[in-house]
Image (cartoon, rainbow, N blue to C red):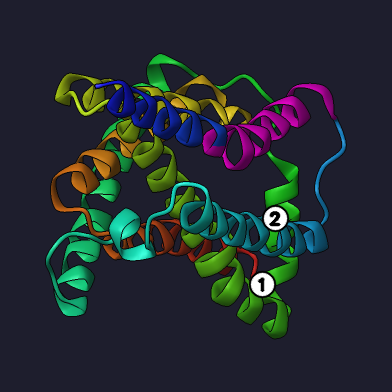
Amino acid sequence: MITFKGDIMTKTSRNILAICIAILPINIIMIWYRLTQTNNFSTTDMIVYPLVFGGGISLLIWWLNKYLIKDSFKETFNPGKGTWYADIAVGLGLTAIYFIMFFIERVTLYRWIPNHNPPNTELIDTMAELANNPLLLLIWFGPVLWIGIALFEELSRVFLLKCLWNINENKNWHVVAIFLASALIGVAHLYQGTAGIISIALKSVIMSFYFYKYRRILPLIISHALYDGVQFAFFVLQFRN
């Protein structure tokens, strides 16, 4: 029994340490920056930062999962049964659900909790510049969207969930962990206002419960990239000359 307790404590400590290294710092920095800084990101920043930080943190998560948590990539991120074509179909289905929520939220949540912050000019400037630069457009809708945003955010979400779930095997705790992780992810998007925080958190709950049941990360990456990409493409088209 003593050895068993020691093993549990070691496992718990490793998972908490992994969260403190890979998840909390980047989220705290994002929240701090949005609360304290007034300078907007340039278009170059909006392209380089996701690739550098998103790609870097993704590699860090892979390293921590392998050498600190001591699990394989498959054990942590893709242990469920399935096929790539089923994952694509589910990803499309999740994308449809997100857009249904998007339109419902626009006539409910965003009217009940209006955002009084000034418009996000950094996104407007980025879209205007991308609209008339095919190379930047290709980079944005390629590696930035799929690696720097979708892959990074879904790896981070699943890694946070798995580390929290590893702390305690109780199913009630697993559900609590889903809401804790989703709250953190929502707050990290505070630049979108209170309604935006709630919207992001609600979508995170759906993604998290899907992963909890089916344990497949590819549908999450696909739906995330398509949801963000379609919205961005729509607005970029408004700025075409």
Q: CA distance from mark 1 to mark 2?
A: 24 Å
The secondary structure type at the circle numbered 2 is helix
Point out which mark residue 131 bears. Answer: 1
Q: Main secondary structure of the magenta part?
A: helix
From the image, tell me which residue sits under label 2.
53
Q: Quadrant of residue 142?
A: bottom right
Q: Quadrant of the C terminus?
A: bottom right
Instruction: Pinpoint residue 31: horizontal percent, then vertical percent.
Output: 67, 27
Q: Position of residue 74 (x, y in %)?
A: 31, 64
Label 2 packing within 10 angstroms: few (<14), some (14-19), many (20+): some
Is residue 202 something that shows in the picture? no
The image position of residue 46, as x and y in percent, is 73, 57
Q: Position of residue 29 (x, y in %)?
A: 72, 33
> What amino acid is at disc 2?
Phe
Query: Is residue 176 rendered magenta in the image?
Result: no
Whether 34 is among the magenta residues is: yes
Residue stretch in magenta: 18-37
**Would you identify the image quadrant in which residue 207 lies?**
top left
Residue closest to the far bottom: 135
